[in-house]
């Protein structure tokens, strides 16, 4: 079986593509990853085949007209409606994605297309080839509304000579992948997924720094982090420019640190390399560049998080209640879903006092801990991710291309 994967936009998405590339390669299948130049380095020396053949997902959107530019900015700043999110994913700028991926697929001749959930062009490439396509796990599913996307997809289908569809679920005709059970999913607009349990710790060599062993245990342990999405809004030394928008990761971090300084707890704050120079945190707040997040969550009483999907999933997998301070993309939807499911609460007041108030309330609310433990138990009852290989093989073997 030949499998073509796509990976776009965020470093967090590369982990999912790598996971399935390794699983499928280990089962004897040929896998190739199509990605962006900015993400190619994450695949080097990983034992997988990858090429930087895709344009930056939103680069062309900034020259595709004011409406499309506004839609992308709304998505990046977490203010997108379902309609604007659909335009950001499948607007006029999708031509570059489709053409680049179709060229790769023409040469590689895949039997299956495993797509990044933000890569809508892959749906049309799969239809053109008559092969199944399956979306991998991603927070993008939270703002991907098949009904809102259908008119855009049909316009593209007409443009590239494919028949139009009446069913919005033509977006996922062969299903999609999840790592949460249906009752706890963060993809509410999509049908139930093929759900699998994957290890919380990706790196078996990971360990916490030795100084953490001496942290006080007579008060709650709160971990705070902003993940890898918000730092994309800062320029990097290698010349990578931030995504358009007004977000300032340092401001978010400062509010987190100041809020935790007012809380009776032991706190660890991961900055993901973002500078917070000049800030003098309270003695009980420990600021670090990075930490093995899933490991620390195993011991934490509360996670103050930006609400990226991976962080939310890691919280559920370690039964850690969440205070979610969303700022971009899928994070606002994730924050609402966390609150709706009773796994934590959105921080609606992003000031230090508002952050401290939400964290204090959650630490005192035992019902949240009980709910997140229920969710963890449900995850533990899922089949292991290794069984996905058999399911994908069966999908390809039983797929009949349309006549």
Image (tube, rainbow, N blue to C red):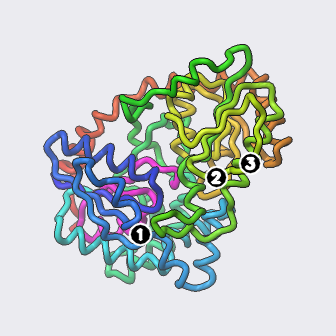
Q: Which residue is mark 2?
A: 275
Q: Which residue is mark 1?
A: 165
Disc 1 element: loop
Q: Is residue 165 visible?
A: yes
Callout in the foreground (1, 2):
2
| Viewer-side residue, 399 vs 292 | 292
Which type of secondary structure does the marked residue at label 3 adopt?
helix
The C terminus, quarter of image = bottom left
Q: CA distance from mark 3 to mark 2?
A: 10 Å
* Residue at the image position 39 percent from the left and 35 percent from the top: 202
Is residue 186 toward the left or the right of residue 162 in the image? right
Report, in whole angstroms, how far the alpha carbon at label 1 lies from the one at label 3.
48 Å
Badge 1 or badge 3: first in the primary sequence:
1
Q: Position of residue 228 (x, y in %)?
A: 53, 51
Q: Are marks 1 and 3 in contact (CB under 8 Å)?
A: no
* Direction from residue 296 to residue 381 in the image, left or right: left
Label 3 sits on residue = 254
**x and y percent of residue 68 in the render?**
58, 78
Q: Is residue 115 magenta?
A: yes
Span highlighted in magenta in the image: 113-140
Give the residue displayed 35% in from the left and 58% down from the top.
41
The residue shown at (39%, 73%) is 55
Does residue 284 lie above or below 51 as drawn?
A: above
Which circle's residue, 1 or 2, is located before the other in the chain? 1
Left or right, 160 with respect to 319, comes to left
Relative height, residue 370 to residue 257 (above, below): above
Q: Taking the image as drawn, is residue 170 in sight?
A: no
Residue density around tag 3, few if under 14, some if 14–19, many if 20 or more, within 10 Å: many
Percent position (x, y) of residue 210?
52, 23
């Amino acid at each position: 079986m030949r499998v073509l994967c796509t990976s776009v936009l965020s470093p967090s998405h590369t982990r999912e593509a790598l996971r399935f590339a390794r699983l499928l390669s280990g089962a004897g299948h040929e896998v190739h990853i199509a990605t962006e130049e900015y993400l190619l380095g994450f695949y080097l020396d990983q034992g997988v085949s990858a090429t930087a053949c895709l344009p930056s997902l939103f680069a062309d959107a900034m020259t595709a007209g004011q409406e499309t530019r506004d839609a992308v900015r709304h998505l990046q700043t977490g203010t997108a409606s379902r309609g604007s999110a659909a335009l950001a994913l499948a607007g006029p700028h999708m031509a570059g994605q489709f053409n680049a991926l179709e060229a790769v697929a023409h040469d590689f001749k895949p039997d299956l297309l495993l797509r990044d959930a933000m890569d809508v062009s892959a749906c049309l490439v799969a239809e053109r080839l008559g092969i199944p396509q399956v979306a991998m796990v991603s927070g993008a599913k939270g703002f991907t509304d098949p009904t809102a996307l259908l008119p855009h997809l049909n316009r593209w289908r007409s443009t590239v000579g494919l028949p139009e569809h009446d069913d919005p679920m033509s977006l996922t005709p062969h299903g999609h992948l999840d790592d949460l059970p249906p009752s706890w999913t963060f993809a509410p607009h999509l049908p139930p997924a093929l759900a699998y349990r994957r290890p919380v710790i990706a790196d078996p060599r990971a360990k916490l720094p030795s100084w953490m062993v001496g942290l006080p245990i007579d008060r709650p342990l709160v971990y705070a982090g902003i993940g890898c999405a918000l730092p994309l809004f800062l320029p990097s030394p290698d010349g990578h420019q931030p995504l358009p928008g007004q977000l300032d990761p340092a401001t978010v971090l400062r509010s987190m640190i100041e809020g935790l300084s007012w809380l009776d707890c032991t706190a660890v704050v991961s900055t993901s390399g973002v500078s917070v120079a000049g800030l003098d945190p309270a003695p009980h707040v420990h600021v670090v560049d990075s930490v093995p997040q899933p490991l620390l969550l195993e011991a934490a009483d509360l996670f103050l998080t930006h609400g990226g999907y991976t962080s939310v999933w890691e919280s559920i997998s370690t039964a850690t209640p969440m205070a979610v301070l969303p700022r971009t993309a899928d994070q606002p939807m994730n924050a609402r879903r966390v609150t709706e499911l009773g796994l934590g609460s959105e921080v609606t007041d992003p000031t230090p006092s508002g952050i401290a108030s939400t964290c204090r309330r959650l630490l005192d609310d035992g019902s949240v801990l009980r709910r997140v433990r229920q969710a963890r138990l449900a995850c533990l009852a899922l089949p292991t991710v290794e069984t996905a290989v058999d399911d994908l093989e069966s999908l390809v073997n039983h797929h009949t291309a349309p006549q």
